Image (cartoon, rainbow, N blue to C red):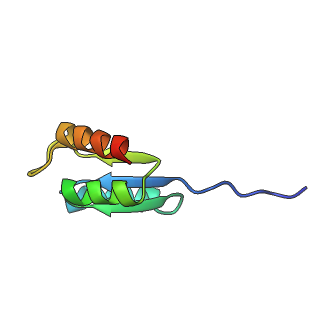
Amino acid sequence: MTHMSRPIARILAIDDEPGNLFTLGTALAPEFDLQIAVRGEQGLRLAATSPPDLILLDVMMPTIDGPDFDSRNLIISRNQ
């Protein structure tokens, strides 16, 4: 029997705390295509240019918080 490999899911992790990103990276990188962003703006650019299957988002960040990111990402998604 042949084994077909399944596509690797892309996860975008956005957090301004390096320790949280390190923990996520350690846990997820072996099994997923993991993208990392340390600012909301950077996460928006990554999500627009290479849409992830899942976004893990810190809801309290200095410049763009979680709800603001969600609304901006929704607008970008609708305009593509």
- Residue at (27%, 54%) from the top-left corner? 44
User: Which of 18 and 38 lies nearest the eye of the viewer?
Assistant: 38
Query: Residue at the location (43% across, 60% down)?
Result: 34
Q: Nearer the viewer, residue 70 or 62?
A: 70
**For the view shown, which residue lies furthest in the left direction?**
62
Image height check: is 45 above or below 75?
below
Which residue, as the protein is rendered here, is positioned at the far front? 79
Pick the residue in front: 62 or 73. Answer: 73
Q: Is residue 67 left or right of residue 35?
A: left
What percent of the width, then of the height, locates residue 23? 33, 57
In the rendered image, which quarter contains the N terminus? bottom right
Percent across and percent down for residue 54 are 43, 46
70 vs 51, left or right, is left
Q: Looking at this view, is 60 or 70 the one in front?
A: 70
- Residue 74 lies, with reference to residue 35, above or below; the image says above
Residue shown at 33%/62% (left/top)?
36
